[in-house]
Amino acid sequence: MARWALRRAAAGGVLLWLVATLTFALVSLAPGDVASRLSDARISPAVRERWRHDFGLDRPLASRYASWLGSALSGDLGSSWTHHRPVTAVLAESIPNTALLASLGLLLEIAGGVAFALAQLRRPHGTADRFITVVTLTAYALPTFLVALGLLYVFSYSLHWLPSSHLLSPAGELATGWAKTRDLLAHLVLPVLTVGIAGMGAVARYLRGSLLDERTQGYVVAARARGCSETRALLTHALPNAMLPLITMIGLSLPFLVSGSLVIEVVFSWPGMGQAMYAAALARDVPLLMGGTLVATLAVVVGNALADLAYAAVDPRVRV
Amino acid sequence: MNPRHARSPLVALGLAMVASACSDKPYPATAPDGAEGPRRGGQCVVGALADVSTFNEYQSAGDSYELQLMELLFPSLMVEQPDFELHPPSFAPSLATSWEFSQDNRVITFHLRPDARWTDGVPVTANDVRFTYLVQKDERIGAPGLEIKDYITDVEVKDAHTVAFHFSRVYPYQLMDANDGHIIPEHAWGKVPMDKWRATDFEEILVTSGPFRVAAHNPQQTLILERDPAWWGAPRPYLDRLVLRVIPDIASQLAQLVAGEIHLVEVVPPREAGRIRDHTELELVEYPSRRWGFVAWNNRRAPFTDRRVRKALSLAVNRKALVDSVYFGHARLAVGPVLSSMWAFNRNLAPLPYDLAQARALLAEAGWRDSDGDGILDRGGKPFVFDLAYPSANSLRADMAVIIQADLARVGVVCRPQQVEYAALLARLDAGQFDASISAWAEATKVDLTAPWTTPSDTQGTSNFMGYSNPEVDRLIAAAREEADYARAKVLLDRIQEIIVDDQPVTFIYEANDLVGISRRIRGADFNALSTFFNIDEWYWGP
């Protein structure tokens, strides 16, 4: 176990370094830099050169890379060129917003997916199964922005039930305690639904497939033969095994918890990592881009490792 | 040019009364209902495409939208008046109650209000004015308006409320240059070493002195400003709060405006203007902006080195039809290098006509003929083909590119529209690696044609990426800049405009109108091309 952890950590470290190096090169070699992008075309070249000098953009790429790597290794991600604050402070604002939305979305996606799959398996190939297949396939195929706009149109602009954007209303910003929480919850509904609906279809399709396989397996047949009800056979025997592929899916979803979705964040004016990284890329804010990339890559590494651990925990045939 | 008066066309603002969540009714006004005229109370929510990046304007890139907001939080010596149509801008008292010029006009002495206070109770004094000047001039900080203070040699503190600006020369824009940039608090920000400014978060040590102060800031989300009761303009502003909502998508801003969730959008796309105008609870306010657009020809690269070719291309583009179809009538044809809404505009000039015959004749004169009969002009065996770059994520310019392409095809010129990411495009323009580009500028209210139209060098022509060079224009611009009498300067400026229009270093296309969508519940708002919030202290929530 210790050797496994060491090996994974080493491999993860190498991956982080590779991704960081590649990203640094891509971002630095892209045409334009923070000084050309930030300034009005009329800001004098002298001022622009001053910015370039301050950010070290007048030094060779290798030297910039070396100093970035040196600081990063000592835990200093530097200061954002556009926010004028430490990169960690900017990330610390954006990641919780993204994580909140993505984790609730993920929960809804799993819960909804499992519920749909179980409903379908009550009578495979029956009317309900076919109907749900259509629904889940549609949900899976719909572009996220369309789902978001549809929800907005119905619940926000037509029915006026739910707020259309942001984490909090202006009144909620100034409120405290329960009033603030309630405001936040109201604002969460539509974005979480959007994330959930998009993923739900995939979960349901996966699970239905593996449940169909599992329910004909010997141990399920044996359970039924022992007098187990169909529901019980499905829920307590087939489901845990059918969930195995989902573990990989969830592990792979973990990066989404920190990287966010630009489309959803823009539509709902949600200040998460998607928007932060998009703006950083447009503005050529190298330190912020590098910081965001590192965190996202770390999430991939950790997500995969957790998925493997979870696999080993639920499936005795797998050893780490 | 004065970048600090420029505004970015990419920036939009929305303003609205609050409808929190969806069930809440708009924030109630504290004054009794039914009363006419301004009254105190109400909360106004301002939407924005992006959050403010800093509360210290000398740290930022001089984004004009941020400067509009800093105007609400920090004092200025004077307030520039929106009268640039008639003459160079005049000024109204603000932090300075009066000012006078010395006999030789080289010193301006300002007398400050004794009652002005920062939010922490410390008085606003002449020391703050001097500190601001030192910051503006400091190389380590590299503030965007650095060169604006070139002719100010010193700012002298006479006493706590008297400050004198010393100039190295006498010129027409002395008041404007002295006034440029908001006054910042020395006692709070003077402690930060200037070489640390770039990476300092000034929000942590924020003190302000304006009609509003910061009540709460949730980054990338909401900025809440509240009325500062200690402001010297009391009883104004009438609004209790001004809330900025970051809504990065303009379509979402419009949807929220129509739904009544926000009540003002600053940059209504021309295409959507009709929808806003026809809405019973909204009003569409339209006025000439300071933004204008053009096709920049690379004057250093053949065949655009030839004046006849540039002029022919301008004549061959049906600019009237282009502006009407892209701007739906919400823009005018641009004429030359000075906006038609400026006092310095040469009113004897008219836009070049749309004249295919003359365009063909000029091209033929320049040696471009269709010698192989393929419908494309050629010279020396090379066809007339060029790339027309424009920034991605700008649908208006994409539409323009396609129309220009079709128009030029009629005279046998092949134009290849080429979409380029914004930062990459700016880098290319800077390096002179382009044939032509659809660009836009926001004009300052200070008329100084040096940066865009003089021959590029270290100090001149600094935004002349087109590489335009005409010694006569250089000479006249320098003379106009020195001329202290604006009537005499106008004669020079008129001549400069004639020459530049004749040279067509760029094809002048449009002068855009600003289109503001506002809820009819907000009263007293008077927008102008200086700022959407120009008279924010007079806005009130109507009955």
Image (tube, grey):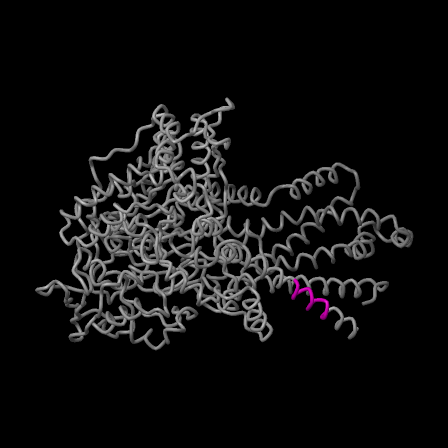
Front position in the image: B468 or B529? B468
Magenta-highlighted residues: A9-18
- Up the image or down, A84 lies above or below B532; here it is below
Which residue sits furthest bottom? B191
Front position in the image: B278 or B533? B533
Give x and y (percent) for residue B33.
26, 49
Give x and y (percent) for residue B79.
21, 57
Quadrant of the rendered image containing residue B110:
bottom left
- Up the image or down, A151 lies above or below A256; here it is above
Relative placement, left or right, of A8 versus B73 is right
Give x and y (percent) for residue B203.
39, 68
Front position in the image: B191 or A100? B191
The residue depicted at 76 percent of the width and 70 percent of the height is A7
The residue depicted at 80 percent of the width and 49 percent of the height is A211
Give x and y (percent) for residue B349.
23, 35
In reply to whether residue B268 is colored magenta, the answer given is no
Is residue B16 in sight in this rendering? no
